[in-house]
């Protein structure tokens, strides 16, 4: 009796861990690098796929670029609008896109939502992650350390852009990430919570992660937990290169999706 109740306890713990991983998002939007079949869906740097944590299924959402141009940042705003960035210069629908730009796709019509050149970024600077906060301000990560409006930001940090100036949002070093960490994907939840992915594997607060892990960052900027593992849940060792989510039980964001 005692043995079987221990065994049940272990099973419950294991289930708790996997349902905990699904608890922050009802759907993940992901791009992978390099190309791989992810739960039966061909996934790569040009196509956004969705991953439904329960039952663990995938579907193609949209193919945004043609090789060799890669999507390196993506954030869904509502059913018809999303932000994305590319890794190289490209012309699309008459729009010249630089690696530091954020493009708004609104019912398939493209415009620049963040113009890197106009905001004073050097031509080679790449935005490698984009998210939005509660106020729909853009949260940006860069591929290199950069000084903006008097603050030096590392490549693992997220910078809030309010439409005219840049502000600190997420400080990776304070959260416990190593100096060589680099955020390469991010999505915003309510209350300042986020999920991020890193360009390479490492350890944060004693927890190991790899380039296909999604890490929950709490509203106070501290590391929360690993909330998704591409290897364990989707069977791919490819890097998660961009990321968005449909939050679970998140009234503010649900409302915003409805308004869109
Ligand atoms: Ca990226
Ligand atoms: Ca970019
Ligand atoms: Ca970065
Ligand atoms: Ca990654």
Image: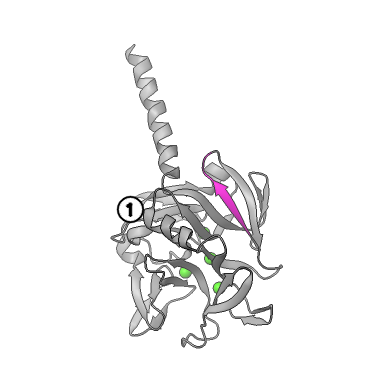
Residue matched to label 1:
205
Badge 1 marks a residue whose secondary structure is loop
Label 1: few (<14), some (14–19) or many (≥20) C-alpha neighbours in 10 Å: few
User: Which sits in the foreground, 211 or 219?
Assistant: 219
Color theme of the render = one colour
Tell me the quarter of the image containing the N terminus: top left
Ligand 4 within 8 Å of disc 1? The answer is no
Does residue 243 lie above or below 124 as drawn?
Answer: above
User: Which sits in the foreground, 48 or 136?
Assistant: 136
**Majority SS type along the magenta span:** strand
List x then y, in percent, for residue 215. 42, 54
Residue 162 location, quadrant: bottom left
Residue 29 location, quadrant: bottom right
Identify which residue is drawn at 64% across, 82% down: 96
Residue, far left: 220
Q: Is residue 222 magenta?
A: no
Identify which residue is drawn at 57% across, 63% down: 80
Count how many numbered circles sit on residues in the image: 1
List x then y, in percent, for residue 193. 36, 58
Residue, far front: 259
List x then y, in percent, for residue 86. 60, 72
Q: Is residue 44 left or right of residue 72?
A: right
List x then y, in percent, for residue 127. 51, 74
User: Which sits in the foreground, 116 or 171?
Assistant: 116
Identify which residue is drawn at 63% across, 68% down: 70
Identify which residue is drawn at 32% across, 14% down: 2
Does residue 256 lie above or below 19 as drawn?
Answer: below
Which range of residues does the magenta coloring cover? 48-54
Q: Is residue 194 visible?
A: no
Q: Is residue 115 visible?
A: yes
Does residue 254 lie above or below 92 as drawn?
Answer: above
């Amino acid at each position: 009796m005692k043995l079987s109740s221990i065994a049940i306890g272990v099973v419950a713990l294991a289930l708790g861990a996997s349902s905990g991983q699904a608890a922050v998002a009802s759907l993940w939007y992901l791009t992978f690098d390099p190309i791989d079949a992810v739960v039966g869906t061909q996934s790569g740097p040009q196509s956004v796929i969705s991953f439904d944590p329960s039952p663990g299924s995938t579907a193609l959402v949209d193919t945004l670029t043609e090789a060799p141009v890669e999507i390196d940042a993506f954030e869904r705003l509502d059913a018809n609008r999303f932000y994305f960035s590319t890794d190289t210069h490209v012309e699309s629908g008459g729009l010249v896109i630089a690696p530091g730009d954020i493009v708004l796709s609104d019912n398939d019509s493209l415009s620049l939502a963040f113009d890197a050149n106009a905001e004073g970024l050097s031509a080679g600077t790449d935005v490698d992650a984009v998210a939005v906060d509660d106020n729909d301000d853009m949260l940006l990560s860069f591929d290199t350390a950069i000084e903006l409006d008097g603050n030096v930001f590392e490549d693992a940090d997220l910078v809030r852009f309010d439409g005219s100036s840049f502000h600190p949002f997420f400080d990776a070093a304070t959260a416990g990430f190593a100096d060589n960490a680099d955020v390469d994907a991010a999505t915003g939840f309510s209350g300042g919570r986020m999920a991020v992915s890193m360009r390479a594997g490492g350890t944060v607060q004693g927890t190991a992660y790899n380039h296909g892990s999604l890490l929950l960052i709490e509203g106070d900027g501290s590391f929360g937990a690993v909330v998704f593992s591409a290897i364990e849940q989707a069977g791919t060792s490819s890097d998660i290169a961009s990321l968005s989510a449909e939050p679970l039980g998140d009234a503010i964001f649900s409302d915003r999706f409805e308004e869109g």
